[in-house]
Image (cartoon, rainbow, N blue to C red):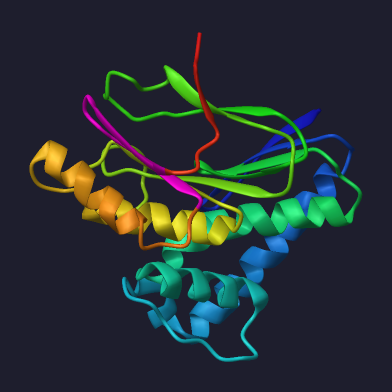
Amino acid sequence: MITRKFLHKETVLNIKVDIDIIDELIEEVLFQRKQLEHYIQKNPYFYCSYEPVEVEKNAPGIVKRMAEAGKLCGVGPMAAVAGTISELCARRGIELGAVKILIENGGDICCCGSEFIIKIFSGDAGISNKIGFKVKPGEILGICTSSQTVGHSVSFGESDAVVAISKNTSVADAAATAVGNAVKGEVAESVQKGIELAKKLPVEGVMIIRGEYIGTYGKLPEIVEIE
């Protein structure tokens, strides 16, 4: 697998792919970012809203994907930005002939075609970096993480990590944010609140980590110990 790290403004991209198309994938990321930035210049509410936003039928594809994910999960469209860029980049790779590909954008992952071990980082939680998901070869899968204690993304909850799984990476990203926002208050009860919300969202599964508490819902990849 060919690997490359690419940084551009807020985008921190890690690429793994089985053919040499790194330059083309970077071009795709820059193109999608430009589309989004131009839209936000004309529609600043899209950028700052924490609620779902309606967009025009002729809006750029990246904008429509983000808006739809936000609508499905009850959050603002920017909650889906990293996952959306990951999936659009991965899909471009597949169009160019890649069979095995993983795109990670600030902790939000889209992968396809190979077995990958995805380590779960949850800050100061005792289980951080000790478990992960074994993703089997198959169709595109989104694995996205939200945290109040780790990273720069906005979360109104108190989780160390919420990981959402979906075949739509935009939805996985938005769902991780939505569930993360619900995890607040008394620890055990807050994890259960997050699980109850996850049941209402269009995701394959969710894992919530807060301190020593872990909650899971739905169909998750195999959970493995990390050496």
Q: Residue at x 71, y 54 (%)?
A: 89
Q: Nearer the viewer, residue 184 or 201?
A: 201
* Image quadrant containing the N terminus: top right
Q: Nearer the viewer, residue 76 or 31?
A: 76
Q: Horizontal placement of 101 versus 178: left or right?
A: right
Q: Horizontal placement of 92 versus 118: left or right?
A: right
Asked if residue 209 is among those painted magenta in the image, a careful observer would answer yes
Residue 155 seen: no
Q: Residue at x 64, y 69 (%)?
A: 34
Q: Is residue 114 above or below residue 88?
A: above
Task: Tell me residue 95's x, y (percent).
Answer: 87, 57
Q: Nearer the viewer, residue 85 or 160?
A: 160
Q: Quadrant of residue 147?
A: top left
In this view, the residue farthest toward the left is 186
Q: How many marks?
A: 0
Task: Tell me residue 199's x, y (percent).
Answer: 36, 56
In this view, the residue farthest toward the top is 227
Q: Residue at x 57, y 75 (%)?
A: 63
Q: Is residue 47 above or below residue 106?
A: below
Task: Tell me residue 163's x, y (percent).
Answer: 42, 42
Q: Quadrant of residue 197?
A: bottom left
Q: Main secondary structure of the magenta part?
A: strand
Q: Residue at x 73, y 48 (%)?
A: 139
Residue 4 seen: yes
Q: Is residue 65 above or below residue 183?
A: below
Q: Horizontal placement of 170 versus 25: left or right?
A: left
Asked if residue 214 is among those painted magenta in the image, a careful observer would answer yes
Q: Quadrant of residue 105?
A: top right
Task: Tell me residue 127's x, y (percent).
Answer: 33, 20
Q: Which residue range is magenta in the image?
A: 204-217
